[in-house]
Amino acid sequence: RGEQRIDGVLRHVADDLDRAVQQLRAGGASVQLVFLDASTETLVRRYESTKRRHPYLDGSGLAEAIEQERAALTQLRESADLLIDTTELNVYALKTRVGELFNEELGDVMRTTVMSFGYKYGIPADVDLVIDCRFLSNPYWDEALRPLTGRDQPILDYLYALDETEPFLDRLSSLLEMLLPAYRQEGKAYLTIALGCTGGRHRSVAMAEAVADRISAFGVDARIHHRDVEK
């Protein structure tokens, strides 16, 4: 009974918030709803490191309680303008990420982020486009290149010597040249393009930097976020 009561209260609060946002927008206000989420494993770890008791925790395990809360908030999550996955973020990194996304100098321009990530650490949840860079030969297997990152010149020399690199970037740039204006026309406020490789340290970092540089020619002031480069 306690779980049902809490579930009803939470769904009621979510519905009230959704209605309030819609009313504000109908009145001409610029309102953006941001939903913060994280993996269940991460949330369990965070709860265990605090003295706070999860409101759904009543006879079931903590992971099950978190999943119940997530289910109750599904509609609110889906209606959010922006989803931020905090799984890999501490409070300082989250502050930086929010600052990048809500830079007032950008005005009404679509906030565009180009992110690199490692598949071994999971695909980020808060992205719109995912591009797999694992078809490129991996510099990791060269012991001299292994300690470097995709921002270092020896890695760039290695990747740009490959036959596939330039054609890949050319075709991806052409696709983004078509998509970015279409997203803006549809009123999208945030766009995140994620490029992934195995560890998120070499190929995806170099390609993310290249993509951000190329789309600047389309008038896009893209922010760059390398999620896993230091791992």
Image (cartoon, grey):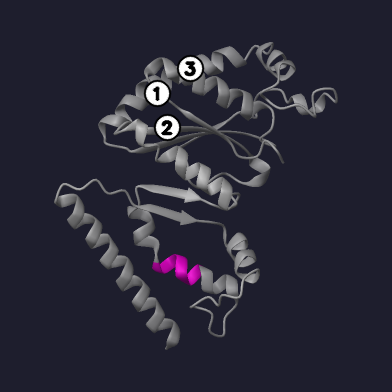
Task: Bin the neighbour count of mark 3 within 10 Å (Cα to Cα): few under 14, some 14-19, many 20 and up.
Answer: many
- Residue 110 seen by the camera: no
Residue beneath disc 1: 220
Task: Give the CA distance from mark 2 to mark 1.
Answer: 7 Å
Amino acid found under the numbered disc labelled 3: Arg
Membership of 70 in magenta stretch = yes
Q: CA distance from mark 1 to mark 3?
A: 9 Å
Residue at (51%, 22%) from the top-left corner? 211
Question: What secondary structure is the stretch in magenta mostly built from?
Answer: helix
The quarter holding residue 115 reads: top right
- How far separated are the C-alphas under marks 3 and 2? 13 Å
The residue identified by callout 3 is: 214
Amino acid type at image mark 1:
Val
Q: Which region shows up in magenta?
A: 67-72
Image marks 2 and 1: residues in contact by CB distance under 8 Å: yes
Which residue position is annotated with label 2?
Answer: 112
Q: Crowding at label 1, few (<14), some or many (≥20) Cα neighbours within 10 Å? A: some
Residue 55: image location, x then y, percent: 48, 78
Residue 25 image offset from top left, x and y in percent? 20, 50
